[in-house]
C-alpha cells in the first residue's frame, strides 16, 4: 500500500509523461537501488504498480481502418 503523497506523485508522473510514466518510475526505482536506498525502492515500486493498475495495460490499442 502506498501513501497518499505517493498517489499524488503518481498522478503528476502520468500528467507529465503519459504512458511513459511507468518507465520513468522504474528508472527512479533503479536509481534508488543503485544508491542502496531500500525504502525508496519500495516507494517507487509501489508508485509504478499504482500507475500500471490505474492506466491499464501498456500495449497499443489497434485502430480499425475506416
Image (cartoon, helix red, strand yellow):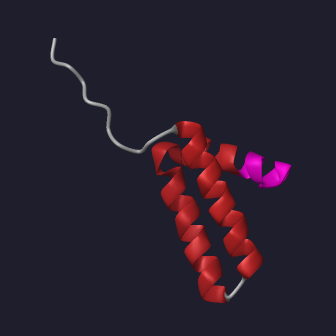
Question: Split into 4 quadrants, where in the image is the N terminus?
Answer: bottom right
Left or right: where does residue 56 sit relative to residue 5? left
User: Most extreme residue toward the left, as rendered?
Assistant: 65
Query: Against 35, is 12 above or below?
Result: above
**Residue name at image x 60 percent, y 71 percent:** 29
Q: Locate residue 28 relative to residue 20 in the image: left or right.
A: right
The image quadrant that residue 14 belongs to is top right
Query: In the picture shown, does residue 15 fall above or below 27?
Result: above
Q: Residue at x 70, y 70 (%)?
A: 42
Where residue 19 sits in the image (x, y, percent)? 47, 44
In front: 17, or 32? 32
Task: Name the side, left or right, on which 8 lies relative to 30.
Answer: right
Q: Is residue 13 magenta?
A: no
Q: Main secondary structure of the magenta part?
A: helix
The residue located at (15%, 17%) in the rendering is 65
Q: Quadrant of residue 2?
A: bottom right
* Residue name at image x 55 percent, y 47 percent: 52
Q: Looking at the picture, does residue 15 appear above or below residue 33? A: above
Farthest-out residue, right: 4
| Picture quarter with the C terminus | top left
Give the image location of residue 47, x and y in percent. Answer: 66, 56
Q: How many marks?
A: 0
Rendering coords of residue 8 (x, y %) = 76, 46
* Bounds of the magenta segment: 1-9
**Residue 60 pos. (x, y %):** 32, 38
- As drawn, the residue found furthest toward the top would be 66
Residue 7 on the magenta span: yes
Q: Does residue 51 lie above or below 61 as drawn?
A: below
Amino acid at each position: 500500500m502506498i501513501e497518499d503523497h505517493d498517489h499524488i506523485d503518481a498522478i503528476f508522473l502520468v500528467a507529465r509523461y503519459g504512458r511513459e510514466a511507468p518507465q520513468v518510475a522504474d528508472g527512479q526505482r533503479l536509481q534508488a537501488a543503485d544508491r542502496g536506498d531500500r525504502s525508496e525502492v519500495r516507494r517507487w515500486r509501489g508508485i509504478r504498480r499504482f500507475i500500471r493498475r490505474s492506466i491499464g495495460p501498456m500495449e497499443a490499442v489497434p485502430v480499425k481502418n475506416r
